[in-house]
Amino acid sequence: MESVYRGFETSLLGLAFCLGLGACLTLGTPPASGNGLAVTLPMLSVTLGGP
């Protein structure tokens, strides 16, 4: 059973690494054109405005 947990933990660490690497690589890209993006959750509101 420990090998199952170890494999699950390793896969989560790999996913976190890939997402972090992708975020670092997209820092220098210009934002997408359009009207913007708005996401609203019960306790959080995020809005990305266009240029």
Image (spheres, rainbow, N blue to C red):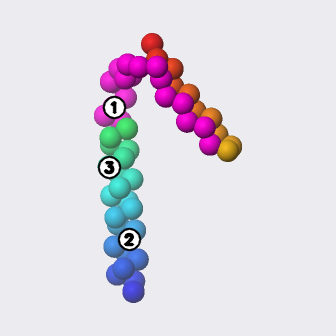
Was residue 33 drawn as part of the magenta stretch in this picture?
yes
Which comes before the other along the chain, label 3 or label 2?
Answer: 2
Numbered badge on residue 18: 3
Question: Where does residue 28 sit, x and y in percent of width and height?
Answer: 34, 24
Q: Is 40 on the left-hand or right-hand side of 10? A: right
- The residue at which mark 2 appears reads as 8
Which comes before the other along the chain, label 1 or label 2?
Answer: 2
Question: Where does residue 48 sit, x and y in percent of width and height?
Answer: 51, 25
Q: Amino acid at mark 1?
A: Thr
Q: Amino acid at mark 3?
A: Cys
Q: State how many labels appear.
A: 3
Distance between mark 3 and mark 2 Cα atoms: 15 Å
Q: Are marks 1 and 2 in contact (CB under 8 Å)?
A: no
Question: Where does residue 19 sit, x and y in percent of width and height?
Answer: 36, 47
Residues in magenta? 24-41
Distance between mark 1 and mark 2 Cα atoms: 27 Å
Q: Is residue 35 above or below residue 41?
A: above
Q: Amino acid at mark 2?
A: Phe
Distance between mark 3 and mark 1 Cα atoms: 12 Å
- Residue that appears at 54% across and 30% down: 38
Badge 2: residue crowd in 10 Å (few <14, some 14–19, many ≥20): few
- The residue at which mark 1 appears reads as 26
